[in-house]
Amino acid sequence: MKIESRMKSMTWEKKVALAATEKDIMEALDHSIEHWKENKNGKGECSFSASSCELCTYCLGFDNECKRCPIFILMDMNGCDKTPWRSMEKHVTGKHGKEGLDFRTFNRKCPTCLKIAVKEYDFLVELREIIKLAKTEIRKKAAHKRLVEKERLQRVRVAALKREAK
Ligand SMILES: [Zn+2]
């Protein structure tokens, strides 16, 4: 339901931009989802640095900007602003700053950290779903256009035949 209402309120331009997400970036998104699956289970490095995110690594590699990243396209925000990732950064620097944790690593024993990690995982999974829905919607629109054009040409042909028959 949440995704459906989000799709409804999204501009066509944004859907087009998201649907244009190329294969390499989709793969990077899959990697990020896997990374956050580990994170939310308190496994692995529990890192939320850009260097541990395939999307950051891939997209920043081009021009040192977020522009190509589907998170940027969806949120209209640089640096994962307004995503659960930003909450993690704020929480870790605020709450765990004095614990000697490496900045960009969260505390796997902290319930709040794990809760935010779940939110980030859900957000990324939702993003993947939104991209897929946008791709499908655009394919459907293209198919509908083809059908309308086919029907129009058919009407033109029928009209021409009728004129010839007179
Ligand atoms: Zn915490």
Image (cartoon, rainbow, N blue to C red):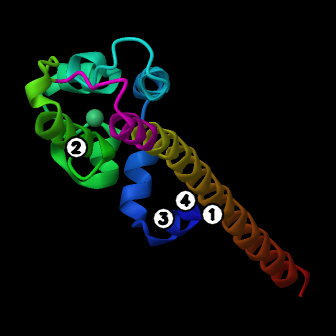
Q: Which residue is mark 2?
A: 86
How far separated are the C-alphas under marks 2 and 4? 21 Å
Neighbor class of circle 3 (other Cα within 10 Å; few <14, some 14-19, many 20+) is few
| Closer mark to the observer between disc 1 and disc 4 | 4
Tell me what residue is drawn at x 44 percent, y 39 percent.
124
Q: Is residue 80 visible?
A: no
Residue 42 x, y percent position in the rendering: 43, 22
On-image quarter of the C terminus? bottom right
| Tag of residue 6 | 3
User: Which quarter of the figure has residue 64?
Assistant: top left
Give the residue type at disc 4: Ile
How far separated are the C-alphas under marks 4 and 3? 5 Å
Give the residue type at disc 1: Lys
Question: Which region of the structure is painted magenta?
Answer: 104-119
Q: Which residue is mark 4?
A: 3
Residue sitting farthest toward the bottom? 166
